[in-house]
Amino acid sequence: MIVAEAVGRALAARGVDVVFGVVGSGNFHVTNALVAAGARFVAARHEGGAATMADAYARMSGRAGVLSVHQGPGLTNAVTGIAEAAKSRTPLVVLAGEATDRRSNFHIDQDALVAAVGAVAMRVTSGEEAWERTEEAYRVAVEERRTVLLNLPLDVQSLPCPVGPTGADARPAAGAEPAAGSAGARPAGRPAAGGADGDLPLAAEVDALARLLAGASRPVFVAGRGARHARRELEALAGRAGALLATSAVARGLFRGSPWDLDVSGGFATPLAAELISGADLVVGWGCALNMWTTRHGSLVPAAGQVVQVDLDPAAIGVHLPVDLGVTGDVAAVATALTGLVPASSGYRSAAVEGRIRAEGRWRAVPYEDAGHDGRIDPRTLTIGLDDLLPAERVVAVDSGNFMGYPSMFLDVPDENGFCFTQAFQSIGLGLATAIGAAVARPDRLPVAALGDGGALMGAAELETVVRLGLPMVVVVYDDEAYGAEVHHFGPHGHPLDTVTFPPADLAAIARGHGFAAVTVTREADLGGVAEWLKGPRDRPLLVHAKVTRDRGSWWLEEAFKGH
């Protein structure tokens, strides 16, 4: 066995059964080793797309993502997707060939490259250590929730390697666990809860939070990605404390079905959610950064209330805003410990509040004046129409841009596994690849990609991937023929906009050229084409080219630009 084969087989032995990538000479053998050991290889058309597919797969599957790329340009092409994964603490192993000879045109400082975007660099340097080094990369990714680059020097890959600790057997090793922070997964290999050096002991932290909950009359829980495995525990505690329930955008859908679900806190919050969260006397963030997006630059934090943050990582507590109490530990474990300590209280829950949530708790219930005109559809009308047509069992992936709030606010999702939001880096162009990775993870659901025209054209290479994989995907393009965020940010100040506006493009024709079915939507009646596609056989994916109104910017982008 050679090193390249050992690396692939070691990952397969840890339970890796899907790998995304673009194959070149530098990652050819390790990719084939994974496939030979039983993994499915999903070929992307660009390494940037492959990186985001692996990220989305990890988020939606509860397993570590794996990405395989060529040395040098293969890795540089993937860097934006790697940065998104690193910022999101996605458990991801990146396998990359490495040209260590400085005379090679492929040579770059790959360690420094990924360290600059927050990933961890590791390297296999000999045959004797190849298996153990690979397992260590996997462990760091899963247990520490990190994106890890495992460099595979070209001159090392062909060295002989002893049979690994699990021998030639590529079955999942005993104890292999899902990826931390993913759907249904408890962080692997970490203590259920515990304080860090210098912090209060866990019992004291829990007691302090129990006292705050017991004294609160209007508590609100805001759950983030680190709480996606803990719905049952959080709902039990919220029931004892009388707390209302909300999520950050990345955990959207976690409390769907609860009569106390306020949906998303932050820029996408309904007027009712913003009112009730800002009116709380205690806000508890569970596995949630409580950053400017989730708190609307702090405006949703009650001025006279208290703020608590519960997180597995003590370094994450208090980073984005001051907190009155930090509790270090796994969200589910902390919530369970608290449930027996908090006296039963109606708290924020009343028949009146429940009635208002039922009547006003979704954006569809908020009245608006349809602004469609001159061959352009109001994006709210478009998205509500799609919400009515598309099956409830869906997984929605949203790109970044001026349009992004419409699908995030008006397309409902069935649960936390129905929304994949790769927005930590706020890069446009990741949405289509996100939807592909989510679709591979959740083949039981209809994948829906919501893109702006700019992001759609950036990621257009992966339209072929959707067709090749046979994904019954709906791709919705909100087309305003511009980089709308910049138009609406700079336009009101009289700046020229020629650099951010574009002539019309026939996106439906582009999609058909890749093998899609396509419809162009300029008015609500045009959605009949979507209804026809949904009747079947759905043997081709569908692109909805929606020409949307562009008279004014979205108010959530106005909020976002306050942070620029």
Image (spheres, rainbow, N blue to C red):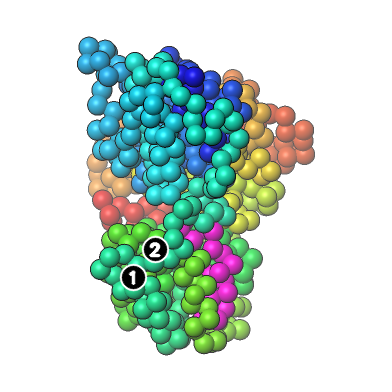
Q: In this view, does 346 lie above or below 129?
A: below
Badge 1 element = strand
Which one is nearer the viewer's eye here, 367 or 124? 124
Q: Give the range drawn in magenta.
A: 223-242
> Which residue occupies 36% across, 76% down?
205
Q: Can residue 248 be seen in this view?
A: no
Point out which mark residue 154 bears: none
Q: Main secondary structure of the magenta part?
A: helix
- Picture quadrant of residue 38: top right
* Image coords of residue 171 (percent x, y): 61, 35
Instruction: Give the labeled residue for mark 2.
Output: 311
Q: Which amino acid does label 1 sit on?
A: Gly
Q: Which residue is drawn at 48% across and 77% down?
A: 338
At horizontal 34% and vertical 73% (from top left) the residue drawn is 201
Looking at the rendered structure, the kind of residue marked 2 is: Asp
Marks 2,1: beta carbons within 8 A: yes
Q: Does the magenta stretch include residue 433?
A: no
**Residue 204 image point, x, y percent:** 36, 78
Which badge, 2 or 1, comes first in the chain's sequence? 2
Q: Mark 1 points at which residue?
A: 326
- Which residue lies at the image location 39% right of the left edge and 34% below the top edge? 133
Dot 1, how many residues are within 10 Å of its Cα: few (below 14), some (14-19), or many (20+)?
many
